[in-house]
Image (cartoon, coloured by chain):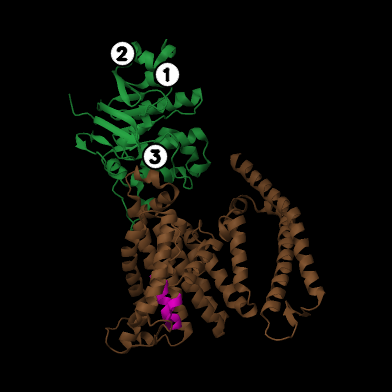
Amino acid sequence: MAALLRQSAVWLIAVAIILILPVMVKSGFYITMLNQMGVLIIFALAYNMLLGQGGMLSFGHAVYFGLAGYSVAHYLNGVGEETLPYIPVSLIPLLGGLVSLGFGILIGFVSSRRAGTTFAMISLGFAEMVTALTLIVVTFFNGEEGIQTDRWIGPEPFGITFGSDVQVYFLIGVWCVLATAAMYALTRTPFGRMCNAVRDNPERVQFIGYNTHRVRWLAFALSSFFAGIAGSLHAINVEHVGFETVGLAQSGLVLFMVWIGGAGIFAGPILGAILITLLNSNLSDITEAWYLYLGLIFMIIVMFAQNGLAGLIVMHEPIWKTNLALFRSMFLPYVLGIGSSLVTAVGAIGVIELLYFMRTRQTAETVTHLYWMEVDAANVLPWAWSVAALVAGYLACRQTYPVMAASYSAAIAEVKAMVAS
Amino acid sequence: MSTPAIELRDVRKNFGNTEIIRGVDLAIEEARIHAIIGPNGAGKSTLFNLMTGLHPLTSGTIHLKGGEITNRPPYEIARSGLARSFQVTNIFARMSVFENIRCGMFWKRGHRYAFWKFANRQSELTEACEAILEQTGLTSRRHVPAGLLSYSDQRALEIAITLASGADVILLDEPTAGMSRSETTQAVDLIRSVSANKTLVIVEHDMGVVFDLADTISVLVYGEIIASGAPKDIRGDTAVREAYLGAEAD
């Protein structure tokens, strides 16, 4: 019983957080953000079935997100006009998932013959093709306007109408937990293990009896199914599906989320989806340079943290599992390292914001906000301070990072010694 | 004589204009250890690659236990009960030793593409993995990611994955390559212990290992088998001595 509790602790905590969050945040803004977060968590995990589990880099997975969204929007409209039979709105994501499963089976058969560059290019091709179709097949996609829909349809079982965003929040919450559990379970099956084997070494897989194309194809189809569930929830959530949901930007966003969170670790995409949604909702109002920052974060993670943010956390797991006291000797080097990173970031943000302001301002006004201050961008001081912080932070990083790395290595060496003895 | 485990008839293979395998006829008897030796570049690994479906044949036929497998894809040949190891270690680097071996078992034990059952719940798989871990001396390293193993442990894992399928015809491509003397001795013991009731074909450079293990030896020189027979006959064969063994066999 205790073991069972320990095993399911993470899931119980997740459910508890989902239940508590809407009580804590009353504002509509945050509920909207949480809804989006839940949708993107499912989408990111689905995408990672390809990238992290199966070793397939797709530039067009939004196709399966968006097509399910369109289908669900049409279905809801059909039920609203009483031309289609009713099923409870709570079950509609399953319908969207099946639509995407169908497309995944068809397109996956063609695209998953090879991994690597060939697969990536074919995924890009299909993404472009479907984006083009949104303008051509007007009856289904309705061009740039997209499809408007209404989730408040049919009877109201137990008084659930999905009229309010909070009700949709719980719908997304339930599906998020179900889909996450299902995708996690998949990694523990013979098929899931073989996905990893195909990722690590497709040549050898053939000599233990497996057709690599079949493994990838199945992974692709199942991943499309879950992407479809996410897309359906998106359609129900915002009651509109536009061409951007199938497009390259959406496909790129999910790639960013997964990579920043960490493709090699199951929870990585969840972390990435949460973080990017938080930043996206909050920062996009504050700064116009938001996408520049997103790109910078992505580049830094790609270059310095191969396993993403989750990887940075997991690499400390052996330490906290053996002896928490080991962190004591790491505290100061980490504070210094993180501190100098922050100084660099403050400087960089200062420079970027000032540049952006000067290049994009509409009036002759030169006074703007930088952090909490009002600064005059025509004055040399704010520039000087920002550049100084950037340079000083960078120089400090060059000193503190090796110390930080050394303290980590020392702790890991001690862990190894403890385990060996 | 019973049906050979593997039978090659006039097998030829060209890479571009170069003929690498030039009409090989070879019958490998069941439940024996058959070594293929020859100088570098004789085509030994190519022959393995043809038998296991990695490369298509230019002409000729290959039969496995009487059934034709010529130009079948590698996974179909593997399913018919032929397993192989590789000269260059070829494992699943990011997965644990245990997982590597278990992946080698899924197909033969009927789990195939199953996504509706947990791998850990299949206790017969776990037990079979334990047995192979024990046999190959990898038990203490079972949780280590395969990419972090020492070279000789990776070689042992290479053989362990090959054994995991339970195939009765096993091809080992230079199983002791790059090993120290004591590691080689261990590897030979391992190979002998797994060979009971199985057909083993090995490509090997170490003549000590070959003459120690093999029931039959075939000598491949420039894409042709120049001699085939028991170790003592091969040792005495003048053509072989000239072409390959030289003073080494004295």
Rendering colour (chain A): brown
At mark 3, the secondary structure is helix
At mark 1, the secondary structure is helix
Question: Residue A407, image x and y in percent?
Answer: 70, 50
Question: Residue A272, image x and y in percent?
Answer: 54, 66
**10 Å neighbourhood of mark 2: few (<14), some, or many (≥20)?**
few
Q: Which residue is at the far bottom?
A: A81
* Amino acid at circle 3: Ile
Residue B208: numbered disc: 1
Q: Is residue A171 visible?
A: no
Q: Which residues are magenta?
A: A227-244
In this rendering, which labeled residue sits more in front, label 2 or label 1? 2
Question: Residue B228, image x and y in percent?
Answer: 29, 19
Distance between mark 3 and mark 1 Cα atoms: 25 Å
Distance between mark 2 and mark 3 Cα atoms: 34 Å
Q: Which chain is displayed in green in the rendered image?
A: B
Magenta highlight on residue A238: yes
Distance between mark 2 and mark 1 Cα atoms: 16 Å
**Could you say which is closer to the camera, residue A7 or residue B80?**
B80
User: Label 3, on which residue?
Assistant: B161
The subunit carrying tag 2 is B
Judge left or right: residue A93 versus residue A399. left
In percent of the image, x 36 and y 78: which residue is there?
A136
